[in-house]
Every structure is written in structure tokens, then in C-alpha cells.
């Protein structure tokens, strides 16, 4: 008998974020590739719904709903997705009665960062797996008594923090048995595509969705703090660097800093504002340059970006700030880790000098370590779904 799995995670809650949509919807597409009867479920509050002018809007008239509709359609999941209003039984996609039926009959809920909280739905699932995609934030919040991680009420816990629970990683487990998983890619969705320009790129936010974390007198800063350490990189490299960067226009000093140091800036909502645009931007690139959140880096969490996985699958080498991922993922061919400006410059030079070898290595890493079918088969097995 075919198992039924529901993935709960934000798509409409992050409108114009094509990469975020890929992250959640790939879980559904990967499960379908395994022969699982899979669906996406998302809840959204009235306070999160806005119109095109940025002002509050009703659920049915919101840009959130329009983005959800476009994202699931682009990835062929319009008949397998539901956006549910927290305040009513209003839905987009699958109707309320069908969503309730799925909650009552599904074999497993995969709850990304504890996204689904609506008791009328969450409590109906017989088995619930928590998927942590923000290692460090989730666990430090829980240790501080902050419910931001939304850990309660799950049966099994997974994290992309590959080193959590090891002696080298200070992130607390909170008494939870964290099972390690990886970000995934459906390889057929992301074939190798020749780039259209010789530019290192990434799609990112300057500060990220969360603030700094203070633990025992130590502050883990936001992404901006890490990025400033590498601001001189374009001047040391024989290729241009472009950031599709979500940064507030009021951050004038940082915008000036970046531009004065040779960084090309483009608005992410224009070049990667839905899944198709995101894919075109990634696949048109030469390689990726990725800086991580301070908590990922300085705890040695082993975090690895699902965006980077899509670059790799497309045959794009990746130059990625070291978070300790090299303990479980080989680096060198297609994937270069760096901790200092000098290492970043050396890594970029290696990619330029041996591009074809790095491009082949990138795809090989995606096939061996991040294939959705392989990673999700293990996750389902550890979650007790056979």
C-alpha cells in the first residue's frame, strides 16, 4: 500500500522568494519520485497577508496567495498543495475537507521548522517528524525557553546540522535525539546547464530572518557580520561577483561598502522572485559564492545550504564559507570551503583555473550526497515509514 506523507512548510509566507519555494516543494517532488503519495500544506495568518502595496490585505486578495498559486503551478503541484488560513477554513488549492482527510489518514507529517501549528490539523496526524533547517537557532532558542523553534509535539526529529550531538559542536541537543539528514535536489529537475556569463553569484539576505543569538557571553552575529569579512574578495579574483541581495535601502553604509569594493547588486525579487526565475538565475551563473549565518559557522554546525545543492546539481562549482560540513561531505572538487579571505581568494582562483573539473565534481557531489530519492528514503526509514 502506498504511504501518504504531508510536508508542512512556508511558501506563501515568503512571497517572491523563489529559492524558499524550491526548498519546500522539492520535498514533495522528491517524495513523489519515491512513489509516495505526497502533498504540501501551509498555514498563514491574517497578519502575514499583504497586497501589492505592502499593506494588509484579505487572504483571497493577498500577494501571498498569488505567489503560492504561481509557485505550485510552476512545479506541477497545483493538485497536491493547500494554503490554509489560520483564522478560518478558507483555503487555496485543496479544500478544507480534503486537508482534514489528509491529516487524519496520512502516515507522516514532515513539519519543516515546526511550521504547522494549527491544532485542528496538526493534532490529527498520527505521526509527526520535525525537520530543522536552521541548526543552532532552533536549539539555542529552545534552551533559552523561547518557543521560536516550535519543537513540541513531534515523534522524531531531523536536522541538517550534521555535527549536532558531537563533541566538536556546542549546539545543545536539549535531550532530543537529532537525526542527521541533508538538503535535497531532484536531479531531473536540475540538469547540468551551461552558464550564460562568467560571474560568481548567490541569492541571499543581508541580515537573514533572525537576529543575533547571545549564549554564555558569546554573540553569534547575523550574516552581514560574516559578509563584511570578505568584502575585498572581488578585487582578488579574476571574475566578477554578483549578489541578488535582500538588503534594506536604509543600510546605506553597507550598500556603499559593497559597491565600492566591486560587488554587483541586483534585487532578488526581480531575478529570483519565483521558482522558474530562481532556476534561471542559478543555472545562468558561473559558480556560487556563499557566506553563512554566524551561528552556523562558529558552532561548526555542519549546516549546508539547499541553494548550494541546486548550484552543484546544475554543474556550478560552489565556494562556500566553512561550517564544518567537510566532516561529512568531501570538499575540493566542485565544492571549496573557506574560512578566511585568503582561502576564499585561493578557492576562487582554483575554480577559474580548473573550471571543467570543478563543474564535473559539482554535479557528482549532487548525485552522490544530495539526491532526493536517496536522502528521503533514509529519512522515511528512520521516521518509521516503510
Image (spheres, rainbow, N blue to C red):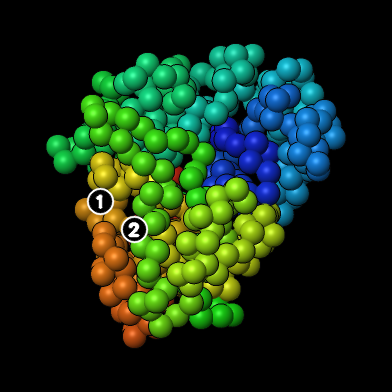
Label 1 CA crowd tier, 10 Å (few <14, some 14–19, many 20+): many
User: Quick one: 93 or 104, which is closer to the camera?
Assistant: 93
Side of 250 where 174 appears, left or right: left
Q: Nearer the viewer, residue 28 or 239?
A: 239
Numbered marks: total: 2
Residue found farthest to the right: 61
Disc 1 vs disc 2: Cβ atoms closer than 8 Å?
Answer: no
**Which residue is label 2 attached to?**
229
Question: Can you give x and y, in whole percent of width and height, for residue 307 in the image?
Answer: 49, 56
**Above-or-below relation of 119 to 233:** above
Task: Decide if residue 327 is in sight here.
Answer: yes
Residue drawn 28% across the image and 29% down it: 215
Residue at horizontal 21 percent and vertical 39 percent from the top: 169
Q: Residue furthest left?
A: 167
Q: Nearer the viewer, mark 1 or mark 2?
A: 2
Q: What residue sits right under mark 1 in the picture? A: 324
Residue in front for this viewpoint, 210 or 235: 235
Residue 9 image position (x, y, % from top left): 57, 35
Residue at 54% across, 58% down: 255
Amino acid at each position: 500500500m502506498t504511504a501518504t506523507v504531508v510536508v508542512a512548510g512556508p511558501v506563501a509566507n515568503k512571497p517572491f522568494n523563489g529559492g524558499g519555494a524550491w526548498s519546500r516543494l522539492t520535498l514533495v517532488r522528491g517524495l513523489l519520485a519515491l512513489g509516495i503519495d505526497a502533498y504540501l500544506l501551509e498555514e498563514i495568518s491574517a497578519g502575514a497577508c499583504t497586497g501589492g502595496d505592502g499593506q494588509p490585505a484579505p487572504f483571497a486578495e493577498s500577494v501571498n496567495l498569488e505567489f503560492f498559486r504561481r509557485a505550485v503551478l510552476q512545479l506541477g503541484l497545483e493538485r497536491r498543495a493547500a494554503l490554509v488560513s489560520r483564522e478560518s477554513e478558507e483555503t487555496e488549492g485543496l479544500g478544507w475537507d480534503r486537508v482534514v482527510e489528509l491529516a487524519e489518514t496520512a502516515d507522516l507529517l514532515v513539519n519543516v521548522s515546526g511550521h504547522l501549528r494549527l491544532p485542528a490539523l496538526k493534532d490529527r496526524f498520527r505521526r509527526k517528524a520535525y525537520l530543522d533547517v536552521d541548526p543552532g537557532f532552533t536549539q539555542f532558542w529552545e534552551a533559552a525557553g523561547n518557543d521560536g523553534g516550535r519543537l513540541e509535539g513531534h515523534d522524531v526529529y531531523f536536522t541538517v546540522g550534521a555535527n549536532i550531538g558531537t563533541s566538536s559542536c556546542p549546539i545543545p541537543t536539549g535531550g532530543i535525539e537529532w537525526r542527521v539528514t541533508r538538503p535535497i535536489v531532484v536531479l531531473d529537475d536540475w540538469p547540468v546547464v551551461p552558464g550564460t556569463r562568467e560571474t560568481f553569484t548567490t541569492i541571499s539576505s543581508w541580515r537573514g530572518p533572525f537576529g543575533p543569538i547571545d549564549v554564555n557571553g558569546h554573540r553569534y552575529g547575523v550574516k552581514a557580520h560574516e559578509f563584511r569579512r570578505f568584502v575585498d574578495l572581488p578585487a582578488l579574483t579574476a571574475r566578477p561577483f554578483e549578489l541578488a541581495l535582500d538588503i534594506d535601502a536604509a543600510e546605506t553604509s553597507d550598500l556603499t561598502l559593497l559597491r565600492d569594493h566591486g560587488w554587483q547588486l541586483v534585487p532578488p525579487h526581480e531575478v529570483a522572485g519565483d521558482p522558474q526565475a530562481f532556476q534561471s538565475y542559478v543555472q545562468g551563473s558561473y559558480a556560487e559564492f556563499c557566506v553563512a549565518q554566524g551561528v552556523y559557522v562558529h558552532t561548526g554546525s555542519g549546516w549546508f545550504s539547499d541553494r548550494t545543492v541546486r548550484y552543484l546539481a546544475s554543474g556550478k562549482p560552489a565556494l562556500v564559507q566553512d561550517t564544518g560540513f567537510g566532516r561529512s561531505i568531501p570538499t575540493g572538487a566542485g565544492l571549496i570551503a573557506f574560512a578566511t579571505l585568503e582561502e576564499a581568494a585561493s578557492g576562487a582562483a582554483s575554480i577559474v583555473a580548473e573550471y571543467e573539473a570543478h563543474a564535473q565534481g559539482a554535479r557528482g557531489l549532487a548525485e552522490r550526497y544530495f539526491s532526493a530519492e536517496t536522502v528521503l528514503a533514509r529519512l522515511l526509514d528512520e521516521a518509521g515509514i516503510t
